[in-house]
C-alpha cells in the first residue's frame, strides 16, 4: 500500500478528477466511431430491408445516420461521460454537414463529365448547328456559335458593368455622400435580383422599347451587365474597405487631390482584389441562363454580330438541348455543359491565382534593410526568413492569411 | 489676445503655433471625379427604379384586364375566349420551394460554416473555402441538370418512403397513385444546395469574427468545444445570420432554371409537396416565354413584376440587417 498515503488528519485524499479532454481523440474513440457506424448500418439494413421492406437509398442513409448518432452518443457516454459524448455528437453532426455539402460538387462535376465527354472534340468546339436535323449523325454539329455568343455577350456585359461597378464602389467607400447608405442597401438588395427579372427588364426596355422586337446578343449583354453590377460592386467595396487608411492619408498629406489618391494609391493597392471580384462576377455571368432566354432568342448558326439578330449562348444551348426530345440534342447539351463548366473553372481558377491576397503590396521600392527594420518594429520580423545577400530581397512574405478570400 | 473668447478646454500658450488652416481648393479634376462616382452610385438607384418602371408599363395591360383578382386568382389561361390568369398559385409555389430550400440549406450551411471556422485544420480550411466558393459559381443550369437526372431518381424512393411511413405528418401526404417526380420537394432540395454557399460564406465570416477572448474564456471555464460554439460563436453571429438567411431566401425565390427543369407546372394551390406539380413565377416565364399571345406576354411580365417586388422587399430587409451588422471603414496601417 504505497500509493495511498494517509494525510496527517487521517482523511484519505481523493484522487484528482481526471481532466476531461474532449479534443483528445484516442484509439478507443476511433474504434467507437467505426463501431457505431457499422452497427448502425447493419441495424438499419436489417430493419429497413429485411423486416419492413422499405425502399430507397436516401431514406436508408438518413435513418442510418440518426441511429449512428444515437449509438455513438450512447457508447461515448459510457466511456467518457455525457458532456464529452454531447461534444462528440455535435462534432460528428457538423462534420457530416460539411461533407454533405462537398459531396454534391464532386457528384455534379463527375456526373456531367460522364454524360458529356463523348462528343467533346475540336469539331464540337468550332462547328455550329447549321443543317443539323433529327436525322443527322450523332457527332455532327457543335457549339462554336454558342461559345462565340457567350464570349461576346459576357465581354460586352463586362465593358458596361465593370467600370460602373468599380465607380459605384469608389462612390460608396471613397467619395461618399448623403445617399451612401441608401446606395449600399440597394446594391446589396440588387445582388439578389432574380436573373429572370433582369432579363425581362431588358426585354421591355431594349428589345421592345428600343430595337422594336429585335432580339440580339447585345440585349443579352445588357441583362448580364445588370446582373454583374451589384455583385462586383459589393466585392470591390469589401476590398476597398481593407485598403489601409494610412495610405490615403499619406497621399493626401503630400497634397494629392482626391482623384489622384483614388487613381494612384487606392485602386492600385486594391488591384488584385478588384481583379478577383471581376473574374468571379464574370464566372457567375457566364453561366446565367434565365436572362438570356428572354433576350437573345437563340440561333442555330453562327452570328458573330452581337448588335444584329438572335444569337446563341452556351447556357442557352444546354437549356434548349435538354428540353428537346432528341437524344442527340440532349447529349450535346451535356457536352456543352462540360464546356461551360470548364469556362467557369478557368475564370474561377484565374480569380484564385490572381487574388491569393486581396491587396497588392508595394514592396518593390522598399530596401531590404528598411523592410526588415519595419518588420522588426511591427513585431512580425520573426516570420521573415533571413536570406543570404546573393538571394536578393527577402522573399515576399506570403499572404497566407487564408481568411482573405 | 486677451479679448478673444476661447472655449474653456482650449489653452492658448503664448507663442505656440496655431494649427494652420489649410484651405481645400477643390480642383476641377476632383469635382469631375466626385461627380462621376456619385453619378454611378445614383445610377444604381436609377436602374432599380427603371426596372420597376418598365415592368409596370408592360404589366399594366394584364393587371388592368384582371383587376385585383390578378393577385389572388389561381390559373393561367391567357388565350381563347375567356382568358383568366393570376399569380395566387404561382406565389404560393414560389414561397413553398424557397422555404423547402431554406430547410435544406440552413443546417447544411451552419454545419459547414462551423466546420470551417471551428473544426477544420488550417490547411483544410483554405480548401473548404474554395470548394464553397466554387459551389457558388456553378451555373444554375448545371444544378438543374444534376437535380433532374441524378437527384430525382434517387429522391423518388425517399419521397415514397416519406409518404408511406411518415404520412402522419401532413406535409408528407400524397394523393393516391400520384407521381412522385417533378415535385416541389425535389426543386426545393436543389435550390437549397444552390443557396447554401451564400449562407455559408456570410456566416463563416461572422463566426470567424467571434471575439477570441470570449472563446478562450468559455474554454477556460471548462466548456467543451460544442458548448463554446453554443454560448459564444452562435450568439455572436445570430444577427448577421438572419440577414444571410433572408438574402438566401430572396435568391431562392428568384431561382429560375433549376426549378424550371425539374417541376411540371401547375397553377392551383396544393398542399402536396412530394408529388408531381409545382411552379414558380420565374420558372413560368422561362418555360412559356413567347407563347401565350400578346396578353400572355403582358401577364408574364406582370408576374415578373410581382416577383420583383417580392424579392425586393425580402432583399431590402436582408441587406439592412446585413449592412447593420458590419462596421468600420478602412484599416489602420
Image (cartoon, coloured by chain):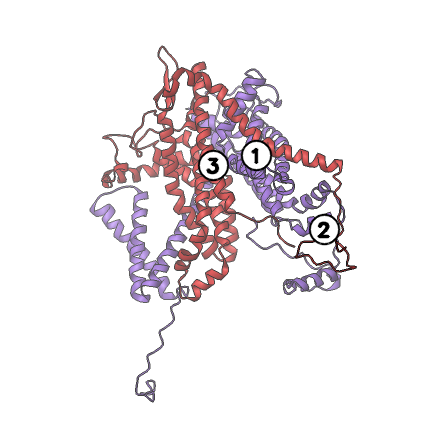
Chain colours: A purple, B red
Find the residue positioned furthest to the front: B3
Q: Position of residue A69 (x, y in %)?
A: 32, 55
Residue for point 30% across, 40% down: B158
Label 1 neighbourhood size at 10 Å, few (<14), some (14-19), many (20+)? many
C-alpha separation, residue under disc 3 versus residue under disc 1: 17 Å
| Quarter assignment of residue A306 | top right
Quadrant where the N terminus of chain A sits is bottom left
Q: Position of residue A329 (x, y in %)?
A: 46, 26
Q: Nearer the viewer, residue A77 or B311?
A: B311
Q: Helix, strand or loop at disc 3?
A: helix
Query: Is residue B18 depicted above or below B217 in this figure?
Result: above
Whether the residues at callouts 2 and 1 have beta carbons within 8 Å, the answer is no
Residue for point 49% across, 61% down: B213
C-alpha separation, residue under disc 2 versus residue under disc 1: 33 Å
Find the residue positioned furthest to the left: A51
Q: Position of residue B203 (x, y in %)?
A: 47, 48
Q: Is residue B216 left or right of residue A233?
A: left
Q: Helix, strand or loop at disc 1?
A: helix
Please give the label number shown on residue A250: 2
Q: Nearer the viewer, residue B139 or B307?
A: B307
Q: Is residue A140 visible?
A: no
Amino acid at each position: 500500500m504505497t500509493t495511498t498515503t494517509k494525510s496527517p488528519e487521517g482523511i484519505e485524499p481523493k484522487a484528482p478528477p481526471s481532466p476531461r479532454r474532449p479534443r483528445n481523440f484516442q484509439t478507443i474513440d476511433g474504434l467507437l466511431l467505426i463501431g457505431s457506424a457499422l452497427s448502425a448500418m447493419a441495424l438499419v439494413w436489417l430493419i429497413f430491408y429485411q423486416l419492413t421492406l422499405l425502399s430507397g437509398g436516401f431514406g436508408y442513409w438518413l435513418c442510418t445516420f440518426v441511429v449512428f448518432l444515437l449509438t455513438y452518443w450512447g457508447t461515448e457516454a459510457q466511456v467518457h461521460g455525457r458532456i464529452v459524448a454531447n461534444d462528440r455528437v455535435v462534432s460528428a453532426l457538423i462534420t457530416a454537414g460539411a461533407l454533405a455539402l462537398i459531396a454534391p460538387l464532386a457528384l455534379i462535376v463527375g456526373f456531367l463529365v460522364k454524360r458529356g465527354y463523348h462528343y467533346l472534340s475540336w469539331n464540337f468546339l468550332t462547328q455550329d448547328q447549321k443543317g443539323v436535323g433529327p436525322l443527322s449523325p450523332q457527332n455532327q454539329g457543335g457549339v462554336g456559335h454558342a461559345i462565340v455568343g457567350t464570349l461576346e455577350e459576357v465581354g460586352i456585359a463586362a465593358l458596361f458593368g465593370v467600370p460602373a461597378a468599380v465607380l459605384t464602389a469608389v462612390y460608396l467607400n471613397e467619395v461618399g455622400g448623403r445617399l451612401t447608405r441608401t446606395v449600399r442597401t440597394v446594391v446589396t438588395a440588387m445582388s439578389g435580383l432574380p436573373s429572370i427579372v433582369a432579363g425581362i427588364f431588358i426585354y421591355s426596355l431594349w428589345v421592345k422599347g428600343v430595337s422594336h422586337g429585335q432580339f440580339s446578343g447585345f440585349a443579352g449583354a445588357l441583362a448580364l451587365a445588370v446582373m454583374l453590377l451589384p455583385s462586383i460592386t459589393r466585392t470591390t467595396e469589401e476590398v476597398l474597405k481593407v485598403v489601409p487608411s494610412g495610405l490615403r492619408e499619406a497621399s493626401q498629406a503630400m497634397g494629392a487631390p482626391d482623384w489622384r489618391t483614388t487613381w494612384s494609391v487606392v485602386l492600385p493597392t486594391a488591384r488584385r482584389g478588384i481583379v478577383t471580384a471581376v473574374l468571379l462576377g464574370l464566372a457567375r455571368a457566364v453561366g446565367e441562363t434565365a436572362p438570356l432566354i428572354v433576350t437573345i432568342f437563340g440561333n442555330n448558326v453562327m452570328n458573330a454580330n452581337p448588335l444584329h439578330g438572335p444569337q446563341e449562348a452556351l447556357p442557352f444551348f444546354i437549356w434548349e438541348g435538354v428540353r428537346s426530345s432528341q437524344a442527340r440534342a440532349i447529349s450535346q447539351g451535356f457536352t456543352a455543359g462540360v464546356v461551360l463548366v470548364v469556362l467557369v473553372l478557368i475564370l474561377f481558377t484565374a480569380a484564385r491565382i490572381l487574388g491569393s491576397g486581396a491587396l497588392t503590396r508595394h514592396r518593390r521600392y522598399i530596401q531590404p534593410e528598411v523592410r526588415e527594420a519595419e518588420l522588426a518594429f511591427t513585431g512580425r520580423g520573426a516570420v521573415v526568413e533571413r536570406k543570404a545577400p546573393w538571394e536578393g530581397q527577402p522573399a515576399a512574405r506570403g499572404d497566407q492569411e487564408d481568411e482573405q478570400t | 489676445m486677451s479679448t478673444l473668447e476661447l472655449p474653456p478646454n482650449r489653452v492658448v500658450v503664448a507663442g505656440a503655433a496655431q494649427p494652420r488652416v489649410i484651405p481645400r481648393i477643390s480642383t476641377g479634376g476632383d469635382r469631375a471625379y466626385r461627380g462621376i462616382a456619385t453619378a454611378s452610385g445614383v445610377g444604381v438607384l436609377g436602374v432599380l427604379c427603371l426596372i420597376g418602371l418598365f415592368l409596370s408599363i408592360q404589366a399594366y395591360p394584364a393587371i388592368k384586364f384582371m383587376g385585383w383578382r390578378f393577385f389572388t386568382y389561381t390559373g393561367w389561361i391567357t388565350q381563347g375566349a375567356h382568358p383568366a390568369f393570376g399569380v395566387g398559385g404561382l406565389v404560393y409555389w414560389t414561397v413553398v420551394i424557397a422555404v423547402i430550400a431554406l430547410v435544406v440549406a440552413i443546417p447544411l450551411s451552419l454545419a459547414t460554416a462551423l466546420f470551417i471556422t471551428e473544426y477544420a485544420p488550417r490547411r483544410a480550411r483554405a480548401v473548404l473555402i474554395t470548394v464553397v466558393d466554387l459551389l457558388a459559381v456553378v451555373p444554375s443550369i448545371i444544378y438543374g441538370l444534376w437535380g433532374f437526372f441524378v437527384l430525382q431518381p434517387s429522391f423518388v424512393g425517399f419521397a415514397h418512403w416519406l409518404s408511406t411511413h411518415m404520412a402522419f405528418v401532413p406535409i408528407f401526404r400524397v394523393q393516391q397513385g400520384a407521381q412522385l417526380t417533378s415535385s416541389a420537394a425535389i426543386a426545393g432540395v436543389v435550390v437549397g444546395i444552390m443557396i447554401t454557399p451564400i449562407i455559408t460564406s456570410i456566416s463563416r465570416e461572422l463566426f470567424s469574427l467571434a471575439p477570441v477572448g470570449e472563446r478562450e474564456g468559455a474554454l477556460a471555464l471548462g466548456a467543451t468545444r460544442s458548448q463554446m460554439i453554443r454560448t459564444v460563436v452562435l450568439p455572436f453571429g445570430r444577427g448577421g445570420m438572419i440577414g444571410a438567411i433572408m438574402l438566401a431566401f430572396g435568391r431562392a425565390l428568384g431561382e429560375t432554371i433549376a426549378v424550371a427543369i425539374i417541376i411540371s407546372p401547375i397553377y392551383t394551390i396544393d398542399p402536396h409537396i412530394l408529388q408531381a406539380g409545382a411552379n414558380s413565377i420565374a420558372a413560368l416565364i422561362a418555360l412559356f416565354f413567347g407563347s401565350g399571345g400578346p396578353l400572355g406576354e403582358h401577364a408574364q411580365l406582370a408576374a415578373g413584376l410581382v416577383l420583383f417586388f417580392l424579392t425586393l422587399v425580402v432583399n431590402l430587409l436582408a441587406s439592412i440587417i446585413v449592412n447593420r451588422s458590419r462596421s468600420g471603414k478602412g484599416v489602420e496601417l
